[in-house]
Image (cartoon, rainbow, N blue to C red):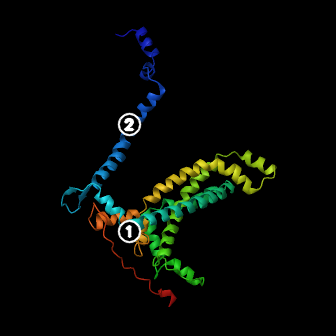
Amino acid sequence: MIGFSAVVNKTRQGPLLNSLDIDDSTLRWLFLLPSVAILAFLSIYPFLQGIWMSLHQWSLAGQGTQFVGLTNYATLLGESRFHGALVNTAVFTGVSVTVELILGVGLAIYLRSLSRRWRPVFRTIFIVPMIVTPIATGLMWRLMLNGQIGVMNYLLYLAGLPIPEWTSSPFMAMFTIIMIDVWQWTPLVIMIAFAGLLSIPDTLYEAARVDGAPRWAIFRHITLPGIKYMIAIAAVFRLMRSFRSFDIIWLVTQGGPGTSTEVLNIYLYRVAFVNLQGGKPPRSASSSWSSPSRPRWAS
């Protein structure tokens, strides 16, 4: 039987980590090691696997693989359709993220200016587009922009405004998918910027108003420095998500008309799963897109 003094001495020794001679830096890495191992397995291994696959000629039809070295990269860089997809991705990502950041910060400032009674109401309204799944969003907007039964064209017709060709012209098709992306993901920027605005003390705004500072000076010297890191976080999140955009663009335009809205993800999808050519880009192929007929309610 263990004596009372032995139990007391064992208790005084404290936890095991306190008895080990480990510095803080090593201890941090020990706690991070499980997460880093999981992240390496889920991210680094697929990345290396993708590089290995890119060095081979392979087919999803099960015809085997053949090592070709850098031939696939040379073919890809010489493909004009790849260059077009790269430009479309840059335009889509750059314009949509920029507009979302500007609108998101502006609406977050407006949300902060509201009373505590109305903040939950408008916050709920702002967040609704973001909680809708991308598939449902794409199907909803495709119906709304339909030339026959779309509510958007009907409202423009009632207002006497010209009805644009939402998905029939290259410019309007790119504008349409950017508009949908801005509609869905601006709420994310609003919530992140609004969280940053709540961390700014009200005393700074009160002191600026007492000194007679104009609104632009208050925004430039108080608001913007207080939320600049939150804006950077929102920009990173949106850039990562925009580069992975596929579902909404595919449902609304399928990369058309032609290849005017074909981003990299749609291009790669057609490479691997439409043409079944996993090792090289597809041949340039034109897609037929018909202009919408005259709507029934305009007759």
Task: Find out whether the residues at labels 1 and 2 contact each other: C-beta distance under 8 Å.
Answer: no
Q: Position of residue 290 (x, y in %)?
A: 40, 82
Vertical comparison of 67 with 177: above or below: above
Instruction: Classify residue 98 as left or right of residue 23.
Output: right
- For label 2, count other residues whose C-alpha is less than 10 Å away and answer few (under 14), some (14-19) or many (20+): few
Q: Nearer the viewer, mark 1 or mark 2?
A: 1
Residue ID at (20%, 57%) = 65
Residue ID at (54%, 56%) = 188
Residue 34: mark:
2
The span from disc 1 to disc 2 (Cα, nearest Å) is 44 Å
Q: Position of residue 182 (x, y in %)?
A: 53, 64
Residue that mark 1 sits on: 80
Is 297 in front, or is 6? 297
Specify the quadrant of the image occupied by residue 39: top left
Quadrant of the snapshot with the N terminus? top left
The numbered mark, 1 or 2, whose residue comes first in the sequence reads 2
Is 80 in front, or is 272? 80
Instruction: Classify residue 118 as left or right of residue 299.
Output: right
Q: Position of residue 274 (x, y in %)?
A: 29, 68
